[in-house]
Amino acid sequence: MPGDSVYRITEIVGTSKTSWEDAAKNAVETASETLRDLRVAEIVKLDMVIEDSKVTAYRARVNLSFKYEKYETKGK
Protein backbone atom coordinates (compact mmCIF):
# COMPACT_ATOMS: atom_id res chain seq x y z
CA MET A 1 0.00 0.00 0.00
CA PRO A 2 1.56 3.34 -1.02
CA GLY A 3 2.34 5.70 1.85
CA ASP A 4 2.87 2.95 4.42
CA SER A 5 6.34 2.81 5.96
CA VAL A 6 8.40 0.43 8.06
CA TYR A 7 11.16 1.59 10.38
CA ARG A 8 14.05 -0.34 11.82
CA ILE A 9 15.43 0.33 15.30
CA THR A 10 19.04 -0.29 16.18
CA GLU A 11 20.82 0.27 19.48
CA ILE A 12 24.19 2.02 19.61
CA VAL A 13 26.42 3.43 22.37
CA GLY A 14 28.16 6.79 22.12
CA THR A 15 30.94 7.94 24.42
CA SER A 16 32.38 11.27 25.47
CA LYS A 17 34.92 12.51 27.97
CA THR A 18 32.82 15.62 28.70
CA SER A 19 29.06 14.84 28.94
CA TRP A 20 26.13 12.52 28.26
CA GLU A 21 24.82 15.03 25.73
CA ASP A 22 28.06 14.84 23.77
CA ALA A 23 28.01 11.04 24.04
CA ALA A 24 24.51 10.90 22.52
CA LYS A 25 25.43 13.43 19.85
CA ASN A 26 28.55 11.43 18.94
CA ALA A 27 26.45 8.28 18.60
CA VAL A 28 23.93 9.90 16.26
CA GLU A 29 26.47 11.78 14.16
CA THR A 30 28.66 8.72 13.70
CA ALA A 31 25.69 6.50 12.83
CA SER A 32 24.46 9.05 10.30
CA GLU A 33 27.63 8.45 8.27
CA THR A 34 26.40 4.97 7.33
CA LEU A 35 22.64 4.97 8.04
CA ARG A 36 20.25 6.92 5.86
CA ASP A 37 16.99 8.62 6.73
CA LEU A 38 17.40 8.66 10.53
CA ARG A 39 14.12 9.61 12.17
CA VAL A 40 14.22 9.39 15.97
CA ALA A 41 16.93 8.96 18.60
CA GLU A 42 15.79 7.71 22.00
CA ILE A 43 18.17 7.74 24.96
CA VAL A 44 17.55 4.48 26.79
CA LYS A 45 20.39 4.42 29.30
CA LEU A 46 23.10 6.69 30.63
CA ASP A 47 26.18 5.49 32.49
CA MET A 48 29.75 6.45 33.29
CA VAL A 49 33.12 4.76 33.21
CA ILE A 50 35.00 5.13 36.50
CA GLU A 51 38.74 4.62 36.87
CA ASP A 52 40.64 5.24 40.08
CA SER A 53 37.50 6.78 41.65
CA LYS A 54 37.20 9.34 38.84
CA VAL A 55 34.73 9.59 35.99
CA THR A 56 36.69 9.08 32.77
CA ALA A 57 33.87 8.78 30.23
CA TYR A 58 30.14 9.30 29.81
CA ARG A 59 28.16 6.78 27.80
CA ALA A 60 24.73 7.08 26.22
CA ARG A 61 22.86 4.06 24.91
CA VAL A 62 20.69 5.26 22.04
CA ASN A 63 17.94 3.56 20.04
CA LEU A 64 17.93 4.96 16.51
CA SER A 65 15.07 4.51 14.10
CA PHE A 66 15.45 4.80 10.37
CA LYS A 67 13.29 4.01 7.40
CA TYR A 68 13.53 0.44 6.17
CA GLU A 69 14.04 0.27 2.44
CA LYS A 70 12.96 -2.73 0.40
CA TYR A 71 15.22 -3.72 -2.44
CA GLU A 72 13.25 -4.12 -5.63
CA THR A 73 14.21 -6.97 -7.93
CA LYS A 74 14.14 -6.63 -11.69
CA GLY A 75 10.90 -7.61 -13.34
CA LYS A 76 8.64 -6.37 -10.54
Image: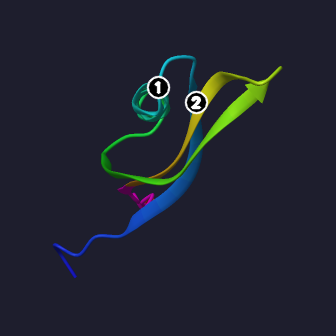
Which residue corresponds to the image point at 48% horizontal and 26% vertical from the top-left? 30
* Residues at marks 1 and 2 touching, judged by CB atoms closer than 8 Å: yes
Q: Residues within 10 Å of mark 1 (few under 14, many from 20)?
A: some
Chief secondary structure of the magenta portion: loop
The span picked out in magenta is 66-72
> Label 2 belongs to which residue?
58
Amino acid marked by disc 2: Tyr
Return the disc, 1 or 2, that comes first in the chain's sequence: 1
Amino acid marked by disc 1: Ser
> Label 1 belongs to which residue?
19
The x and y percentages for residue 8 are 46, 62
Taking the magenta stretch, the answer to whether it contains residue 1 is no
Q: Is residue 68 above or below residue 1?
A: above
Q: Is residue 71 above or below residue 1?
A: above
Left or right, 57 with respect to 70, comes to right
Q: Is residue 41 above or below residue 48?
A: below
Colour convention:
rainbow
Mark 2 falls on what kind of element?
A: strand
